[in-house]
Image (cartoon, helix red, strand yellow):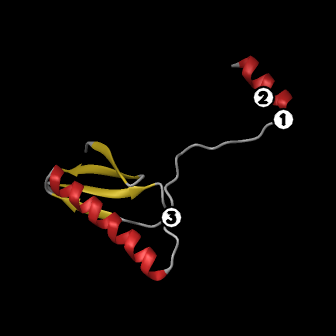
Amino acid sequence: MSINTMEYKGYTALIEYSAEDECLIGHVIGINDRLGFDGESIAEITQNFHDVLDNYLALCEKTGKQPELPKSGKLSLRLPVEFHASVAQQA
């Protein structure tokens, strides 16, 4: 199974090829809400990704729900200066 990603409106989708199903399968990553889609070509999976995300954002607006923002994977921590200096020196 080969893995790739695509981005749209700041959201990232993980795209996998399923040899068993002979199609592309995608889902939006970095949020807790589950958004999945599929397609038989790059053009179709791209359009379906855009459609599912546009529908999600429209539904959130219609229901008054704040859409979940994608997580970047970055985490900032505040450390005591001495500890930070010690870690930097050891690195």
Residue at the spot of label 2: 84
Which residue lies at the image location 28% right of the left edge and 60% below the top edge? 50
Q: CA distance from mark 3 to mark 1?
A: 32 Å
Residue 13 visible somewhere in the drawing: yes
User: Relative to 58, is 17 on the left or the right?
Assistant: left
Image quarter for residue 91? Answer: top right
Q: In the image, what residue type sits under mark 2?
A: His
Residue at the spot of label 3: 68
Q: Could you say where residue 76 lies in the image, as x and y percent from the top left?
A: 67, 42
Residue at the spot of label 1: 80
Image quarter for residue 23? Answer: bottom left
User: Could you classify mark 3 by the number of other residues whose Cα lies within 10 Å: few (under 14), some (14-19), or many (20 or more)?
Assistant: some
Q: In the image, what residue type sits under mark 3?
A: Glu
Q: Between 72 and 90, which is closer to the camera in this rendering?
A: 72
Q: Report helix, strand or loop for mark 1.
A: loop
Residue 19 visible somewhere in the drawing: no
Q: In the image, what residue type sits under mark 1?
A: Pro
Q: Report helix, strand or loop for mark 3.
A: loop
Q: Could you say where residue 19 lies in the image, as x and y percent from the top left?
A: 17, 50
Q: Report helix, strand or loop for mark 2.
A: helix
Which residue lies at the image location 23% right of the left edge and 54% below the top edge? 46
Q: CA distance from mark 3 to mark 2?
A: 33 Å
Q: Nearer the viewer, mark 3 or mark 2?
A: 3
